[in-house]
Amino acid sequence: MKKSLLVILTVLLTTSGIFAQDKDYEEYLKREQADLAKFIAQENSRWQDYVDLDSKEWQQLVDEVEKLWGVDAKFSNKKTWVRYGATKKTRTVTDFEKGYLKIEALGKEGETKEELLEKTSELVKEVIEEKADPTDSEPILSNQLEAEVKPEKIPAKYVKVVKVTSPEGKVENKLIIKIPFKSNHLKTRAERVLPIVQEYSSKYKINPKLVMAVIQTESAFNPKARSTFMQKNGRIGHAYGLMQLVPYSGGKEAYNSLGHNGTPTPNYLYNEKNNLELGIIYLNLLSKKYFKEVTNKVKNEYLIICAYNTGPGNVARALIGNTDLSDATVKANSMGTQELYNHLVRKLPYQETRDFLARVVKRILIY
């Protein structure tokens, strides 16, 4: 009897120890989950602080520039890289689609060409030497310009001074230097990123020709691409880099799929390898997650091209009138390849996306 009681007591003590451990483990899990939730909240708050600051600084830049340049104010977009000097009275405009570098300076009436050139010297040096990423071996404009450009030596045939009227009604002298790119400038930039595209396209099972066509259409291979738009909440939003990733939507989804928490920063997205990897991952997610049931390769590509530009929900809406991806997939599968293309070009909610689809499909054939 005593022996039986001893066994029961031993079992009870052992079991209570297990229960105690289970309880401790549950508490540990709760603490871990709370810590993770806190971290994510802090990251989101930090990002929102950045967005607010970025919006404020952007608006301040717009105000300063428009005060001096009036209706001639220019800002960076997908295919044009604009830089202003410290006083905002000098600027460079690099157009990667049309293929030229323009250097401009505002001055008082009577200021000479030499004086105006001197004002631009520091900014020109910065632009000519700037790299897309500090680790790059060559500057962005390496092997791009038709003529060698140095602050102290700009060919006279590209330089002129004109009279302009300031927003305040004053007559000013304006220096304009316009240097064309080489005829093969687009090919040079494409070849620069091709090895990275091939590497990640192979890794994430995406057609590299499709990726190259997307990059050309999004940014004309401009590593400094930055487009600006108004968000639904009234704040300023931006898309960054070669593949024009929005940090808090497609960019974030791809970033998180790599195991990162939070949201990629603009500096992260301006790194060419980071940008290309996340863009290709997002194309993979669109193909293998959102439209995985569309197994026809061409039709799948049509859908992910559109979704890359406007989101999967808008693609579904174009097909069936709502955002149900399952029903949209059934609809896409029931259509012929050309029929699907024609339908998307007619029914996508935004003209921008219709044009995007047509351009990407046409450019796939180039590569």
Image: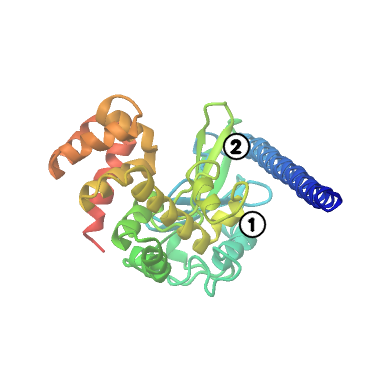
Q: Nearer the viewer, mark 2 or mark 1?
A: 2
Q: Which disc number belongs to residue 62?
A: 2
Mark closest to the chain's N terminus, 2 or 1: 2
Identify the element where label 2 is drawn.
Answer: helix
Please state which of residues 2 and 50 is positioned toward the viewer in this rendering.
Answer: 2
Residue at the image position 15 percent from the left and 38 percent from the top: 335
Q: Tell me where residue 271 appears, x and y as whole percent.
A: 55, 61
Residue 358: name its quadrant. top left
Please state which of residues 269 and 113 is positioned toward the viewer in this rendering.
Answer: 269
Q: Horizontally, is 183 left or right of 240 in the view?
A: left
Please determine whether, in this image, residue 283 is positioned above or below residue 345.
below
Q: Amino acid at mark 2?
A: Val
Q: Horizontally, is 102 left or right of 298 in the view?
A: right
Q: Amino acid at mark 1?
A: Lys
Q: Horizontally, is 289 left or right of 296 in the view?
A: right
What colouring method underlies this structural image?
Answer: rainbow
Whether residue 344 appears in this view of the structure is no
Whether residue 201 appears in this view of the structure is yes
Residue at the image position 22 percent from the left and 46 percent from the top: 299
Spot the residue most to the right: 2
Q: Tell me where residue 296 appears, x and y as whole percent.
A: 20, 50
Quadrant the C terminus occupies: bottom left
Spot the residue most to the bottom: 137
Q: Residues within 10 Å of mark 1 (few under 14, many from 20)?
A: many
Structural distance between the alpha carbons of marks 2 and 1: 21 Å
Residue 329: name its quadrant. top left
Please state which of residues 140 and 124 is positioned toward the viewer in this rendering.
Answer: 140
**Exactly how many numbered labels are in the figure?**
2
Q: Which disc number belongs to residue 181?
A: none
Spot the residue most to the front: 1
Identify the element where label 1 is drawn.
Answer: helix
Look at mark 1 in the image and give the residue it sits on.
119
